[in-house]
Amino acid sequence: MEPERNGIVINRMYAGDYLSSNLGHEIINLFASDSGKHYLYLNARGDFHASHQGRIKYMLLTMHIMKGVMEVLGYAKIMEDVYNYGDDHVNQARYIQEHKITYGGISILDIFNDAEQQDVYITYVADKLYIPKKTRVFLSDNPDFSKFKTEDWKIITLNGHKLGTTSLKQYIYPEDMGDDYSSLIKEIEAGDWQLSLDRISSENIKGVNSRSISLFDICLLQNSEQAFSNALYYFMCKPEYKSLWASFFSDCLGCSLTDSFTVTREEVAIIKNDDAGWNQRISGGRIDLFIRDINNYVIIENKIKSDINCVESDRKLATKANQLVRYWNYAHWLAEKQLRKIHVKACVLRPNYSHVDINNPDYPEVVYKDITYRDLYVFLIKNKGRFSSDRNFVSLVEAMERHTFNTVSEYMKHEMEEVFYSRIKELQDKLE
């Protein structure tokens, strides 16, 4: 007796770091093959346990947003299990060759031949793929997520089921889930969806980004605060770029830096030997980047993977002090020691996917500007002509791009699509 197809599998995609030598197989999920059929790959390895054979009716294609939240990028109704429990590379290759499964004229076997070798290339076949029409769709077991809701969001709240934190696939059957299963089926079958017509086209291939792999990629420094702070310091110190940076800080902080400004990396922010009462204020720590010119001080705190930190001396205070307060006190103490008026500005530079709380009600006088990597990236791209011949500067700007997306998964999707197009173009060129 054939099992009933009534299950739903939540397939979490774009959950890793991708370089030109590592193309995630799930990239095929949102594209039709050249024949028009949609072949689907189930993370993490394309396989499943025998108990799920012939039982999955729908695949939800999802992307991690935050803890307990997945965005639904689309869904497909399963027509056939391509993978059978225990399949090996030979059986998969035979199926692909018999059905002539190609993307942009290139066999899927060739596309993934020099990527990470796996036995499974395709898990399921679906006739159609549907994507949200107007409203973004989210699965959530996080009660705090609803406060971010906008008019163009649909949140499906899971009450009896927790979204996995490590597993890249989760199975949901009617006997397991009850109301949650019913909510998902209702949204799938009656929600606001449209047919996806995306497939590899000549326009995709022509639009391949020509970004070169840099040391940021090779040494896996894309998320390193130290690496970005060091690179920013290096280019802020170069005389030929002083006016570029002065223009940026004029736009975002409203300060008028001269081209003679200097930069200190990891300025020690300790107030000492002061008889005017400043040394009674909390200080200490190291400022990521500290800019000085004749009339201005600028504090730049770079935050990529970390939050605003506190030390033991901060915690002993009745007020909620932190590193931003300490740096602010230090810069103003230093400014007051000068014989001229010094304007102090401060900012936190952060990725768009990171939310750093820079407001401190216990210290209303401490004012930091929130500057995102997208703010900096957009400014630099608009001024690319001023550094386009400097390969190192271009690499820094390209490395910033991943930090301009609203979520890390959005960037992973973007990067993986670029690698997919590049791989197909490379193989097409070899055939000519």
Image: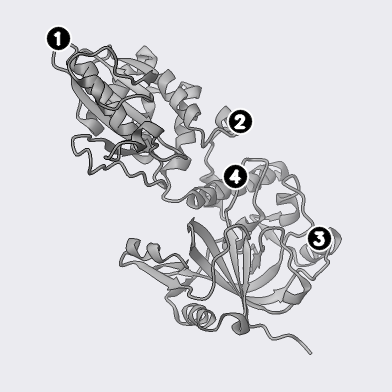
Amino acid type of the residue that numbered disc 3 sits on in the rendered structure: Ala
Q: Nearer the viewer, mark 1 or mark 4?
A: 1
Q: Looking at the image, which is closer to me, 144 or 224?
A: 144
Marked residue nearer the N-terminal end (1 or 3):
3
Is disc 1 placed on a helix, strand or loop? Answer: loop
Marked residue nearer the N-terminal end (4 or 3):
4
Q: Local crowd at mark 3 within 10 Å, few (<14), some, or many (≥20)? A: some
Estimate the x, y position of residue 66 in percent, counting from the top left.
Answer: 47, 56
In the drawing, does residue 195 fall left or right of residue 118? left
In the drawing, does residue 280 fall left or right of residue 152? left
In the drawing, does residue 27 fall left or right of residue 286? right
> What residue is pinned by disc 1?
339
Q: Looking at the image, which is closer to me, 117 or 305?
A: 305
Q: Nearer the viewer, mark 1 or mark 3?
A: 1
> What residue is pinned by disc 4?
17
State yes or no: discs 2 and 1 in contact (Cβ < 8 Å). Answer: no
CA distance separating discs 2 and 3:
34 Å
The residue positioned 65% from the left and 48% from the top of the image is 23
Quarter of the view holding residue 404: top left
The residue positioned 25% from the left and 33% from the top of the image is 252
> What residue is pinned by disc 2?
219
Quarter of the view holding residue 351: top left
Marked residue nearer the N-terminal end (1 or 4):
4
Estimate the x, y position of residue 220 in percent, counting from the top left.
Answer: 59, 34
CA distance separating discs 2 and 4:
12 Å
Amino acid type of the residue that numbered disc 2 sits on in the rendered structure: Cys
Looking at this view, name the residue that lies furthest to the right: 90
Estimate the x, y position of residue 398 in percent, counting from the top left.
Answer: 48, 34
